Amino acid sequence: MFDNLNKTEKIYLNFNASKVRWLSESKITPSDYFCLGSAENFKSVSIWKQNSTLDDFEPVILSEYQNLDGYVTEIKSKSLEEFFLSTSNGSVYHFKCYHDEQRLIELNKWSKANDVVNGFDFNNDGEELCFVTENGTINFIRLRSQINNLNDLDYNELCSLNSVLYLKHFEIAVSDSLGRIKIWDSRSRENKKSCLSLFMEGESSSITCMANDPNKKHIIACGNLNGIIAIYDVRSNKRPFTLTHNHSEPITEIGFHPFSGDSLFSSSFNGGLWSWNSSNRGELKSGWEDRTVNFKNYLDSNRYTLNSFDLNNDKILAVNNNLCLYKLKYQNLF
Amino acid sequence: MDEIPSFKIFTDPSWRRIISQSREVFNDLHQNLEANSQSEIIKTETVNLSDQCLDANQKYIDVIENELGIMNADNENKEKLQVMLQVWKLCQIIFIKSSPSGTLLTDLQEWYQTTNNIDPMVQAIFSSNSENTEKLHLDDKYWICILLAVAQGRIDTGRHLLSFYPIDKAPVVRTINELLHTMPNLSTHSHLSLFEFKAKWEYWQKKCVQVLTSENFEGDDNGGMQTICKLLCADESTFLSLKLMFNNWYYMLISYMSYANPTFNISDLHMSIESGPFMKEFENELDEFDAIILKIFEFDVDVIVNECVKLFSNNFFSAHFLNILHLTGKLQLKSEIDFGSAFREENRLPIQEQHLIEYSLQLLSAAWSPSLLSLNQTAFDYLLKCQMDETGIELIETYLERIPLTEISQSEANKVFYIAFQYGLHDLAFSIGRVMQMRALKGRQYGDALTWNAKIKDCSFGNILADKIMEEFFQSNDLKLLDLTESLVKEIIYSDRLIFLNKYREFYRLAYLSSKSERTENLKQAIDLLVHLLQVPNLIPFKFKKLVFFQLHDLIDQNVFNEDQLFNVLKSIQLYENRRRFLAIRPISGEVHECSLEDENSEENKWKSLFEKLSGKIAENFVQNKIEF
């Protein structure tokens, strides 16, 4: 199953990218466009196009926006032409790109002073966007309203919040630096208590990234600073299923395979792009605990921190901390 | 140094790509060598070493060449990089590829051909005369092209150009063509020994001389044919006369040697530099670049690297090249032969490490803000290879210490912490943790403070933090303060105050936050827990004891205490009062200040009420037992 991988291609960029994301409606819809958010003290986001008919990977930069107020901490695409991004200076931007005309326009910007936005997510209809910050605040933006509607949950967590995911229309999961995932109801702003708080005993390392299963929204995978991946089922309170490498390098990004929740990818500080595959023995109802898990490193040769990766259909893009952009293909899961 | 050069050019995109790619080559090379040295096959090791080094050097050259290919024409770094490429290639030929008795002809000719490429000129001739090939030979650049082609050893190109000269005009063209065609070529005759090749060459050159003296050169406009012939005969004065065409003494030298003595080796080269007239011809026009080339031919590594540093204004070339030389074992410095230098201070570090350090420092100074961590990490990779006296690691530590931790985000701080930890700088990592936990505490981000504290397991700060959290909790009654420790249960065993905080949280949840159905059961557990806590000496901080007792007061009515517990509570109160009296006489700072309620009256009342309730309960139990009995 793993050996159907085509060759890995890499090019050198001019800057270090902290996030790479395919621009597409969903992870299943194939797309040739992707965007790169810069890392460190570069403050730009750029849109690229790759030509899938060519043999070699030679993406072309279409447009660039260089006036962000900080480096990019998260990008999520809404459609082929629209995406949101958050920066280290407390802002969330809404961009629209016109690929044919090679233009990139900032549609909207919301800011929170003196804060760092660590992550955000928007719900399915695109009505609401929720972002979490380092100062422990959870904030909501009403996207469709005429006025710039930014308000926050009346609850200030006393530690930094690292990522947020929408599980259901009004339910969000927030992870923090104490290794906890809290489930909140986003309808009420006066919430003083989360619906549920999940954590692993003995493992309180800061959770750096989260992803949810494409088919079952109640399954969340998260990676922490100790290199441990935990797969939670938010419906139950039992101990999560954990996957670990034989090292304790922090995990930078995590994501499920676009088509199936049986396969998980993670990237870590020491440059590996790991694929975890729970073999399906034909039992549809079993979870990760009941199957054997195979794992493999797709970027063996890379030794520099893998900052980010993203999947689209059968392609994976990854960026590392030494100016490289990798492209891999992952075929024939089924 | 009076002036600190600005290495901001390292942040130029082209330079960054070169730096990143060179870093990969450097790391790969060293990793492979380390892997090799641990393998069991010894014989192939030495072969592998020099091959790998040559490969790596070639890769460095390729990196620069690729980048030059992509670069814009108006990029200010282009010129310097081209010069660097030239120097690097020549160094590769002279230092790495060559052996003392080996011939340098092919490599040096290739160097000449690539660094003074005549293709554009040739193409220009063809394109401007494309309709009219009969006039080709009248083009201004025609003869120069042919002469250069012959001088550079590009015989095919020369012959091709020559074919456009009308034969009927000058029949000697055919002869010259024949000579060029039969010229012995070192690469095609590699099966011959040097001696045999030399014999062949001499035989061929005699024919050239014969042509020159006896043939009829009529129809030869501007003497081009004659000049070609003279070049083939290795006529020194002809070479000298073509000074403008060659433009540089080294090109002239290489060209001359390729005809005078094609099997020349490095010592032949030296001799002809010293005794030959070529340098003198260009005496007035020598610049630093020429000096470098001369030194390369003279094998003087010291001067070369120093001059190169000056010429390129950075140590990029010298660091990488010296490293390669050092690894191949070919690094012979004139300074090392001088024994006196061994006692001089500045030569404490081996020279290749000096240059690596210089380069790393330049990288670090280019990364002028702590956010360019990746550039810093590049520098660290190089510093790690400077192992003499652990200079490298010390420099890394010094640099990491100076990163302003108060200005960066949590995730960046985590990265720095991780890097320090990775390099084995545990003390530094600990101090980073301490700064971060204090910063979090000052910003009232108790959760972050807890995370950092748990990471570094700092006991005293843990105690302070626990006290602060409890204080805030008693003032604000905000549950999330208590909940902070819910995920840290197994990790905070180093600090007893934190353990207490955790246990208190358990008590609180059991006592006040359980559902109706489990109420009584949980209350009993809660009381049990609390009484146990009271009994452990010194677990509950003195200042909170009063508040804990007041909380007990509220629970007494619920009928969940048993007899023993009541007595234990009384005992604890007694101990508490003893302590209080002791502290009144002999105050110990930190313990005296108690957390109190709003006003004194209510406190007094509370104590009264507490004693009443306690005695009431005990009396009740007593009576009941009596009755049962």
Image (cartoon, rainbow, N blue to C red):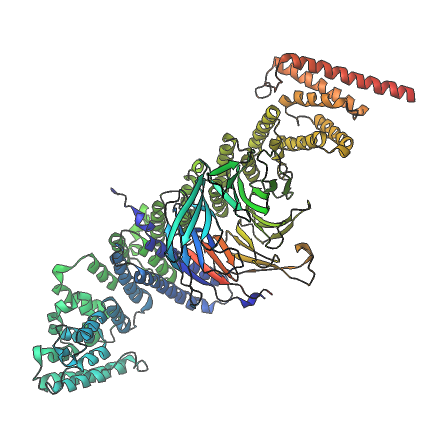
Rendered residue at 42%/40% (across/down): B403
| Quarter of the view holding residue A56 | bottom left
Between B306 and B558, which is closer to the camera in this rendering? B558
User: x, y (%) of residue B312?
Assistant: 26, 54
User: x, y (%) of residue B564?
Assistant: 80, 24
Rendered residue at 72%/13% (across/down): B608
Between B483 and B463, which is closer to the camera in this rendering? B483
Rendered residue at 43%/68% (across/down): A55
Number of callouts in the render? 0
Between B172 and B396, which is closer to the camera in this rendering? B172
Q: Residue furthest front?
A: A146
User: x, y (%) of residue B20?
Assistant: 39, 55
Q: Residue furthest right?
A: B629
| Quarter of the view holding residue B569 | top right
Q: Quadrant of the C terminus of chain A?
A: bottom right
User: Up-down: is B142 above or below A260?
Assistant: below
User: Up-down: is A73 above or below B261?
Assistant: above
Rendered residue at 58%/48% (across/down): A222
Residue A14 can be seen in this image: no
Residue A81 can be seen in this image: yes
Between A91 and B467, which is closer to the camera in this rendering? A91
| Quarter of the view holding residue A13 | bottom left
User: Up-down: is A286 above or below B58?
Assistant: above
User: x, y (%) of residue A232?
Assistant: 64, 48
Q: Quadrant of the N terminus of chain A?
A: bottom right
Please indicate whether residue A265 sits to the left or right of residue B66 in the image. right
User: Up-down: is A60 above or below B150?
Assistant: above
Please indicate whether residue B616 sits to the left or right of residue B287 in the image. right
